[in-house]
Image (cartoon, rainbow, N blue to C red):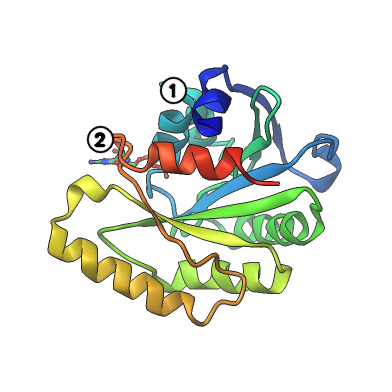
Amino acid sequence: ERGRLLFAAPVDFLKGVVAMSGLPPADRLEVCFAGRSNVGKSSLINALTNRKNLARASNTPGRTQEINYFTTQDGPYLVDLPGYGFAQAPVAVVAKWQALLKSYLSGRATLRRVFVLIDSRHGIKAVDDEILTLLDRSAVTFQVVLTKLDKINLKDREKVIEQVKTALQKHPAAYPEIVITSSEKGEGIETLRAIIANLE
Ligand code: GDP
């Protein structure tokens, strides 16, 4: 109920941030979304917020290295982190982004949860595991959100859930419950809204 109410009000783009000095005042809680490029992050944020193109800005070249802030009505900031794992990205760009990510994750006291999106067709890859390790070190609670569930059958669903559960055993900062979603079908969206609305 709280989740439905929170997302019944409009969610708006606030700003794109490229350095810690650009972060908005830490005057409310925030949750962030991380994941490999193409994992379905924009689609998930759009589904959560009932918007078609809210999170598209983060996918246009030039904005990809920005941390994008969205405001909810009387609720937490929604924070869209740049997609990682772009093979083509220049080394210097990757290094700059990793430095910003590190400072952000360890230096943002109001950050309550990091949703790490994992494509259900691929499971946790090495590049995801690097992020999970960084999250452990930052001591910020993260939760895995499986995406694109409509693309796999029930048997593969069980397999990927098992793979993720096993991988999470090595990560002390992991929240045990995995969220299963399909932005296409709307599966898991209410669950995710409720998790966000109930964070304290
Ligand atoms: P991002 O790069 O992580 O922001 O990924 P996008 O949200 O742009 O999605 C990447 C591709 O996956 C697009 O072609 C989407 O239409 C598709 N996609 C995203 N979510 C889903 C889903 O739940 N189901 C299906 N079938 N396709 C999806």
Q: Nearer the viewer, residue 171 or 104?
A: 171
Q: Relative to 71, is 119 above or below? A: below
Q: Residue furthest bottom?
A: 170
Q: Residue at x 18, y 64 (%)?
A: 156
Q: Relative to 165, is 180 above or below? A: above
- Which element carries disc 1, helix, strand or loop? loop
Q: Residue at x 48, y 54 (%)?
A: 35
- Please give the residue where the numbered disc 1 appears in the rendered image: 50
Q: Residue at x 71, y 25 (%)?
A: 74
- Please give the residue where the numbered disc 2 appears in the rendered image: 185
Q: Position of residue 41 (x, y in %)?
A: 44, 43
Q: Is residue 113 left or right of residue 17?
A: left
Residue 187: quadrant of the picture: top left
Q: Is residue 79 left or right of residue 160?
A: right
Please, what is the three-letter code of the amino acid marked with disc 2? Answer: Lys
| Residue at mark 2: C-beta within 8 A of ligand 1 | yes
Graded by Cα atoms within 10 Å as few (under 14), some (14 to 19) or many (20 or more), the crowding at tag 1 reads some
Q: Position of residue 72 (x, y in %)?
A: 64, 26
Q: Residue at x 39, y 79 (%)?
A: 166
- Which element carries disc 2, helix, strand or loop? loop
Q: Where on the image, by quarter, is ligand 1?
A: top left
